[in-house]
Structures are given as C-alpha cells and as structure tokens.
Amino acid sequence: MVAVVIALVLRTFVIAALIEAYVIPSGSMIPTLKIGDCLFALKLPYGFHLPFSHLILFGPQSPDRGDVVVFKYPEDPNISFVKRVIALPGDKVEIRQKRVFINDKILRYEPVSAEDDQTKDIPMRELYIVQRETIGSHQHYVMFRRGEDDDSYGPLVVPEKKLFVLGDNRDSSDDSRSWGLVPFENLEGRATLIWCSLDWEKRGRKLGLPSLRGERLFTLIQ
C-alpha cells in the first residue's frame, strides 16, 4: 500500500514538473489559438527545473524559430503570455508591410482560402487577410487586417539570451514590437497540445455554460 501511495505521489510530481496548463484569454494568437483554448506547455524543451531548487537535470535547450512559447511577461512576471518565437539571438529581424524578414530574407507567405476549415470561423473573416507563414520547419496561419499594410519595424539584431516574439493575429497582438524582447529566463515552456476548447460566445441558454469546440480536442499546436 505504501508503495502505491509513493508511486502516485511521484507520478503527480513528475507530471507537475513536466507539464503546465494554461487557458487562452485573448485573441492575439488567432487563428492558431482561440479564446477559451486550454493547452499544455511542456517544460522539458527549455530545461527541466525542480520546483524546490535550481538543479537542471537535462541541460536546457534553446527555443527554435516558430515555437509557440509560454513566458513570464517582462513587464509583470505574475502574468504569463503565449506568443510565437520569430527571431533568435544574433538574428536580424525586420517587418516591412507586415511581412517578416529574418537576416534580410522574407519568410514564406502563401494565400489561404476563405473556405479553409482552420480559418473560416474567424469572426468577420472578410476583414482579414489570412496567410500561411513558414518559418524554419514550422508552418502556421497568420492574419492581418485588410487595408492596413504599412506597418514596419526594425531592423533590430536580437541580443544574446533574448527572443523576439509575435502573435499570429498580427494587428491585435501586444508583443515584442511594443514592449521589447523576452529574456530566456522568462521562458516557462513550449505550448504543445490543446486538450480542451471552450467557446464562451456560444453559451447554453439554460445554464449559461460555454459550448465545446469538439474539433479542437487533443490537437497539436503548430
């Protein structure tokens, strides 16, 4: 019996040390992440830290371009943000007419049909340009407001131990363009899985509970 209790405690401890749960409160990562998405972030890729010490069991890995990461907001460490890594230390990053350039090379952008299953439920979809952006080995959706294509940023060379991050909803994201870079020590994990998704805009009439987006259950985050 004692062995079973110890095993359960250890399993709970290991799971808590490896995985952190988060809920998306805003639309800054639409269409990749929607308001009400419940996700798991894996702590292991950026160093496996025991909560009671500074011991690192598996040396910390560096994040990659395109990773969706969870981190402590640099201006208030009590708040966690979720954004996409765009540029790494040493990268020259620039934005011209909303399109991202890394080391003077534009990322790959492809048009997405309004009937695409992943984006057709975006509210007021006709007001946005949705494209498929490719950065490194990551391919994902981003969106921009129509008629506003003069945004620019940089160029900036990312210093050591810092990251440049953006939201996929590029015109409705509070990110590195406004408050700066993310220090490596602020990283909490890599967002990997949407395990549940609740649509609070579609509540039941009787109990007022949110509807479940069944198609998003247990989907990997790209």
Image (cartoon, rainbow, N blue to C red):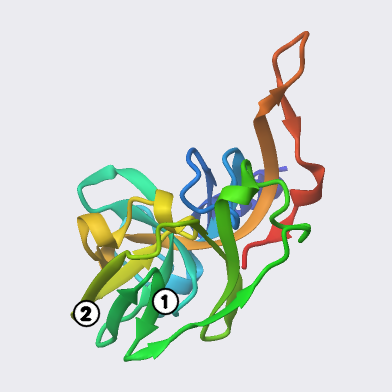
In what element is the residue under mark 2? Answer: strand
Q: Is residue 192 left or right of residue 25?
A: right
Q: Which residue is mark 2?
A: 155
Q: Quadrant of the C terminus?
A: bottom right
* Residue 105 position within the rendered picture, expressed as x and y whole percent measured from the top left: 39, 91
Q: Amino acid at mark 2?
A: Pro
Query: Residue 5 lies in what quarter of the image?
Result: top right
* Residue 84 position within the rendered picture, expressed as x and y whole percent measured from the top left: 45, 65
* Residue 191 position within the rendered picture, expressed as x and y whole percent measured from the top left: 54, 60
Q: Is residue 217 visible?
A: no
Disc marking residue 63: 1
Q: Is residue 132 left or right of residue 65?
A: right
Query: Residue 124 lies in what quarter of the image?
Result: top right
Q: Is residue 5 left or right of residue 174?
A: right
Query: Residue 50 lies in what quarter of the image?
Result: bottom left
Q: Amino acid at mark 1?
A: Pro
Residue that lies at the very extreme toward the bottom in this rendered image:
104
Q: Nearer the viewer, residue 79 or 154?
A: 154
Q: Quadrant of the N terminus?
A: top right
- Graded by Cα atoms within 10 Å as few (under 14), some (14 to 19) or many (20 or more), the crowding at tag 1 reads some
Q: Nearer the viewer, residue 29 or 151?
A: 151
* Mark sitting earlier along the chain (2/1): 1
Q: Residue sitting at 27 percent across and 61 percent down?
A: 177
In what element is the residue under mark 1? Answer: loop
